[in-house]
Image: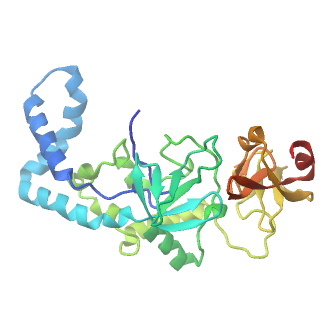
Amino acid sequence: MGCWDIFCLLCGNTSHGSFDNLEESFFESIEYYEKIANSKSKKNKFFIDYFTPIYNVYKKNPKDFLQSIKNLHKSTKWLNKCTFLAADGSVIHNCKEVACNIEFIDNAGNTYMSQTYLDDIYDNYGVFVHTDCWKFIKQKYKINLSYKYLPINKVPVTENKIFSFINYGQIEKYWAQDFDFIKIISDNNEELCVSPLKSDIVGKNIKKVFTKLKIRDDVNRKSPLVSATFYKPGIYRIGNNGNIWMIKGGKWIELKDTVTTEINNIKLIKKIGFLHDINTLPIFVSKITNKKITIVTTEELANKYI
């Protein structure tokens, strides 16, 4: 399948700015288009139909179009600074995407896998947002956004949307295996790629997304911060009070027999999620130290497996 772009769950932009070779790639596309523009071959039809309007905009003023590519490269550098919201609850600022758009690395060299749920529990996974988008939420709502606030449902890494019910508006038009920076320029929509700290348009889009996520920050709330309406019966999650809660009858119901212990049961490990994730079993990893796994579970499961 190769590599593909993934998108910020707040603003809908990709995890990196435009690449240094964007202009070079564009020229290669122009050369190829001019070579096949009059072709009647069906195999060329898709590219011709796609590239014709872009080519027409470029030909009206080539100098301005190429300058726009240079400008976009500068103005999208903010996209390279990402904040990783890990399922263990940690928030890691100023990460950058380093491999096939799903692997991120922090300043200390630690790696994080975005939107993946692997058998190896030692792989720290979660989701990314742009650091500027995280700061925008902090400024507007006084919330230090982390994984526990998100109505996460586990989706395949190849899915564009982490939240299927969110419409990100015009920016979705440019989602593809590789985010379509060239088409954004030809459509004169570069404003969609500006930091929300500088753009009212992007800021308004994030506010709409944030409202639909129903995110709240209630220190007196004992149950999980996420609304029960996002989940089906049988889903478990850690509550704001540290105990395990489950969805039953459309509500969060607390399990009173929550315990913390260590395990080395490999079969059980493969059924565990990190502390702030969801699970179909009442068991979560709270800490990993030297391959020792501390879990939060119920007394019944602890007695059965430990």
- In the image, residue 5 sits, relative to residue 94, either above or below, namely above
Residue 288 is left or right of residue 79, and the answer is right
| Residue 188, image x, y percentages | 23, 58
Q: Quadrant of the N terminus?
A: top left
| Residue 11, image x, y percentages | 45, 61
Residue at image point 82% right, 56% down: 245
Which quarter of the figure has residue 132? bottom left
Residue at image point 14% right, 21% down: 40
Taking the image as drawn, is residue 138 in sight?
A: yes
Which quarter of the figure has residue 130? bottom left
Q: How is the image coloured?
A: rainbow
| Residue 54, image x, y percentages | 18, 46
Residue at image point 24% right, 61% down: 73
Farthest front residue? Answer: 290
Residue 258 is left or right of residue 132, and the answer is right
- In the image, residue 3 sits, relative to residue 135, either above or below, namely above
- In the image, residue 65 sits, relative to residue 119, either above or below, namely below
Residue at image point 67% right, 62% down: 148
Taking the image as drawn, is residue 251 in sight?
A: no
Residue 166 is left or right of residue 19, and the answer is right
Q: How many marks?
A: 0
| Residue 7, image x, y percentages | 44, 53
Farthest top residue? Answer: 41
Front in this rendered view, residue 271 or 266: 266
Residue 43 is left or right of residue 216, and the answer is left
